[in-house]
Amino acid sequence: ALRTVLELALFEGREWIATGDLAGFLCIPLGTASVTIRILVEARLAIHRKYEGIQLTEDGRRAAARAQRRYRLAELFLT
C-alpha cells in the first residue's frame, strides 16, 4: 500500500490520495482500504484526514522509496 500511495501521489501530482482512489487502484473493497490506511496511520507512516484522504509522512515516503527499490531490484533479477 505504501508504494501505491507514493505512485498515485507522484502520478497524479497530488499530496492527498482519496481512500476510494486507493481502493480502486488496488482493486480492493473500500473497507479493506480503510483498514490498510488505519494500519499505516498507527505505524506513523501516513496521515489520514476525513474527506481529504491519505498522505504519507516523511517516514512513510522513505519506507515507500525503500520498498520501491526492493521491488525494482527483484523485478530486475526475475526478468
Image (spheres, rainbow, N blue to C red):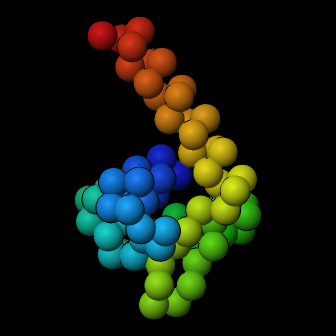
Q: Is residue 9 above or below residue 73?
A: below
Q: Which one is nearer the viewer's eye here, 23 or 21? A: 21
Q: Is residue 46 left or right of residue 4?
A: right
Q: Is residue 39 left or right of residue 78?
A: right
Residue at image location 52% in from the left, 64% down from the top:
36
- Left or right relative to 15: residue 38: right
Q: Quadrant of the C terminus?
A: top left
Q: How far from the left and from the top, in percent, is residue 30?
A: 35, 75
Residue 12 against residue 17 in the figure, above or below: above
Q: How many marks?
A: 0
Q: Residue at x 52, y 90 (%)?
A: 50
- Quadrant in the picture for residue 27: bottom left
For the question of whether residue 32 can be seen, the reply is: no
Please indicate, yes or no, whether residue 70 appears anywhere in the rendered image. Answer: yes
| Residue 6 location (% of width, % of height) | 47, 53
Going by the picture, which residue comes out furthest to the front? 13
The location of residue 28, given as percent across then percent down, is 31, 63
Q: Residue at x 73, y 64 (%)?
A: 44
Q: Residue at x 38, y 19 (%)?
A: 75
In terms of image quadrants, where is residue 9?
A: bottom left
Q: Is 41 on the left-hand or right-hand side of 21?
A: right
Asked if residue 66 is positioned above or below residue 57 in the image, the reply reads: above
Q: Point out residue 76 in the picture as x, y percentages from the top left corner.
A: 39, 13
Quadrant assignment, res 62: top right
Q: In the figure, 44 relative to 73: above or below? A: below
